[in-house]
Each structure stands twice: as structure tokens, then as C-alpha cells.
Image: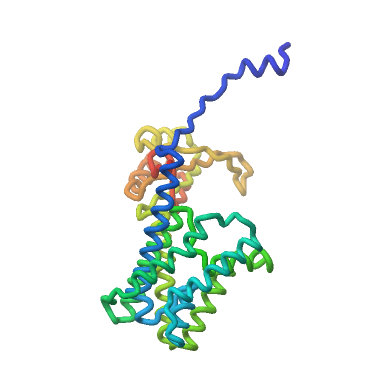
Amino acid sequence: MSTIDERKHIVPALPNKRRAPRFSNNTRTVFSYVAMLAGAFFIAASFNLFLLPNRIASGGVSGISIILNTLTHIPAAYTQWALNIPLFIAGVLVLGKQFGVKTAVGSIVLPLFVLLTSHWTPPTSDPLLSAIYGGLGVGIGLGLVFRGRGSTGGLDVAAQILHRVLGIRLGLAVAMLDGLVILSAGLFISLENALYALIALFTTSKTIDVIQTGLQTSKAAYIISRDPERVSAAILHELDRGLTRLQGTGGFTGDDRPVLLTVVGQNEVLKLKLLVRDADPDAFVIITNAAEVLGEGFRDERI
């Protein structure tokens, strides 16, 4: 009878299939800072070309700077510095040093770019176009900053402080602070500008999603079949896609049955449905959107 130690030597060790990153740590660090600086520049340019000239205060410290600029004519960059730096210090004191260098750089560099691009001439005076283009540009900039694993500081830091001190959910804290800024714009500028600010904020959020996850949409399919072997073979060999077997239990019968999970591209959905129908006409199929898929056959995020 073999001992536990002897049995350990009988079981072969699984090979480590983890792929090495395509770029070194130094290269990735440089990329992250380049992405963060490029993103900050996009935000500043969009701010001065579209949002500030049309008084579209779509939340954040930039929105506060637009309101104060409208009321007092204080340059927006100075207001942003005056708010970003104390918020960063408060964040370090309350939340610790995890903010790091990137948040400090973002808090200082973004207002600097705003100052350097403040003389640029706005291409349009139409507030609706400005809200759309401004939201698009800010979304691209924030998406690049997030891809660089950075932050522009501002009210995001204040939201994290509220989350830590008062226990408010982070998403709710961000929405509350941005909502207060937009409400203030409605009171001190005009209700019409506040509505344009909402359009810009919505455009920004959707653009960030595109930058973060890409334009290509994949589909995740859950397949419950009485003939899982035949369905699996069709997916593996005819569609050339991998799949995973999940263990499921019938709610009415209580029988154990596998649930097949596979992910395909948008253009492969019809072929998948035809293959499953041919393999098992009675199969139950659920197809949902997959916002982002990483791995073999899909996006490679080894950077």
C-alpha cells in the first residue's frame, strides 16, 4: 500500500502554460505613463475646445472650474490645481499611500495641459455638438488614463474618501458628486447647460467603455443538451472554438446534466445555432453579450 508521499510522485505535474508577457516591466511602465499623459492631453484639449467655451459643466473638478470661471472669470486650470492638490493630500491622509505617483502626476499634469491649451480656438459654438464632441474627447482621454492604470484625481478621490469614511458605495458617491456639480451648473449657469452636461457625461461614460473593452462584441453561449458529446464535438471541430463543461441540475427533474459554455464572435453566432440545432434539435440555448473576452482566440492583454 503506497503512502501519501509515494502517491505524490505518481501524479505527473501539470506543465505551466502561463505565457510570458510580450513586454518587459520597464516597457509596460513607460507605456502606462505615455497612455496617461496622452489621455490627460485629450481631456484638456476637449475641455478647452468644447466644454469650457459653451459652459458645459459635466461633473468633476473640471465642471466646478467651469462654474467658477463663469461666475468669477478665474482661469479653469488654477481652480483645478486648487482643488486637485488638497484632494490628493486628503486622499493620502485618509486612504493611505496607495494612490502613488500616477495619481499625483494626473492631478498636476491635467491642469497644466488645460493651461497650455487654453488659447485654442473652439471649432463650434453649437452646444449640442460641443456636448457630444467634448464628451467623446473626455471619454477617450479617461479611457487612455485608465488603460495606463492611472487617475486624474479630482472628485474621484473625494468619492473614495466618502466611501471609506461614510460607507457610501463608490459608484453612488461618484454619481452624487457629479450630480451636485451638474445641479450647480443648472442653478448658476442655466438649466439648458445642465441638460447638455448630462449629454456630455453620458457620451463620456459610453466612450470609456469602448476604449476599455473595444468595439468588437463577443457572445457567450450556454447550451443544455441531452447529447452533450455530439454538441461538444460540433463546437470543437466544426466551429473550432473551445468550451467548458459546467455541472447543472434540472430544477424540475433533479437530474444532473452538463451545461456547455462557449464564447464566439458576433459573426459566428448563426453558425453556432445551426450546429447546435443539427446536433440536438431539442437543446436549450442561451446567448448573451460578453463585454470583454481575454485569452486564446480573442484579445491578448499581455502588455
- Colour treatment of the image: rainbow
Say if 138 sits above or below 285 in the image.
below
Q: Is residue 128 above or below residue 254?
A: below
Quadrant including the N terminus: top right
**Is 247 situated left or right of 19 in this image?**
right
Q: Residue 280, relative to residue 86: is it above or below? A: above
Image quadrant where one finds the C terminus: top left
Image x and y of residue 156, in percent: 54, 66
Q: Residue at x 41, y 86 (%)?
A: 192
Q: Position of residue 278 (x, y in %)?
A: 37, 40
Which residue is farthest left? 123
Q: Position of residue 218 (x, y in %)?
A: 39, 50
Front position in the image: 280 or 223 = 223
Q: Looking at this view, name the residue that lies furthest to the top.
A: 1
Toward which corner of the image does residue 172 lie, by quadrant?
bottom right
Whether residue 119 can be seen here: yes
Image coordinates for residue 11, horizontal then vertical, percent = 60, 19
Left or right: where does residue 94 sit relative to residue 177?
right
Residue shown at 37% from the left, 76% from the top: 51
In the displayed structure image, the side of residue 37 where residue 18 appears, left or right: right
Q: Is residue 109 left or right of residue 84?
A: left
> Which is more toward the observer, 127 or 235?
127
Residue 169 seen in render: no
Please tell me which residue is depicted at 49% across the width and 71% down the height of the picture: 81
Q: How many callouts does the rendering have?
A: 0
Q: Residue at x 34, y 68 (%)?
A: 45
